[in-house]
Image (cartoon, grey):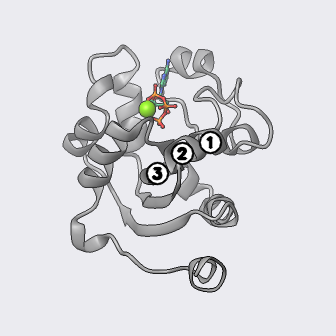
Amino acid sequence: MIERTLILLKPDAVQRSICGEVISRFERAGLKIVGMKMFWADRDFAKQHYAEHVEKKFYPGLEDMIVMGPVIAMALEGVEAIALVRKMCGATDPKSAAPGTIRGDYAQVSYEHADEKGIGVKNVIHASANPEDAKKEVALWFDDKELHSYKTVQEVHVFE
Ligand code: ATP
Ligand code: MG
């Protein structure tokens, strides 16, 4: 069950210079990077990406957060990659994210704090929630020619 999923290293991750550490975790888990780029979303693009949240109370802060700087967008491929990557990210609210997860290890703000300040929760990473979202989001962020099929060392030397 090989799946593709979209992750964004959000502007807070880029500005904190922790992208390499986060990317290493995915590589260590055996996930394959099949697309990767730096992209500075504008407000229109943010609304497309977060269409499901546009009407919500926290949306203005979320939009400010996602357009405040460039993100690193990645398409990752692997066995049941969508659920695996969500598990590695941890709970959305950093306060509830377990230690060992990306949000648990790298973020500390809570919903309460973010809502009090009217800002989006800075939780380092976005990951597609389910197969339908993954399909839409990979297509939104990447053209076909920006997605690559190749074999990793594992595939060439272990599985073949
Ligand atoms: P993401 O879509 O970023 O991977 P998620 O799927 O775990 O996160 P969503 O419910 O889709 O969570 O929320 C999208 C993003 O909006 C969250 O990652 C967070 O940055 C922000 N957010 C969600 N709920 C709140 C809230 N109550 N207050 C402030 N920001 C919020
Ligand atoms: Mg989401």
Which residue carries the number 2 mark?
125
The residue most toward the right is 99
Which class describes the residues within 10 Å of circle 2: few (<14), some (14-19), or many (20+)? many
Tag count? 3
Left or right: residue 22 compared with residue 35: right
- Determine which residue is flagged by label 1: 89
Distance CA(mark 2)–CA(mark 1): 7 Å
Label 2 C-beta lies within 8 Å of the nearest ligand 1 atom:
yes
In the image, which is nearer the foreground, mark 2 or mark 3? Answer: 3
Q: Quadrant of the C terminus?
A: bottom right
Q: Which residue is mark 3?
A: 7
Cβ atoms at labels 3 and 1 below 8 Å apart: yes
Along the viewing direction, whichever of 94 and 5 lies nearer the viewer: 5
**CB under 8 Å between callouts 2 and 3?**
yes
Percent across and percent down for residue 67 are: 35, 45
- Whichever of callouts 2 and 3 sits on the residue coming sooner in the sequence is 3
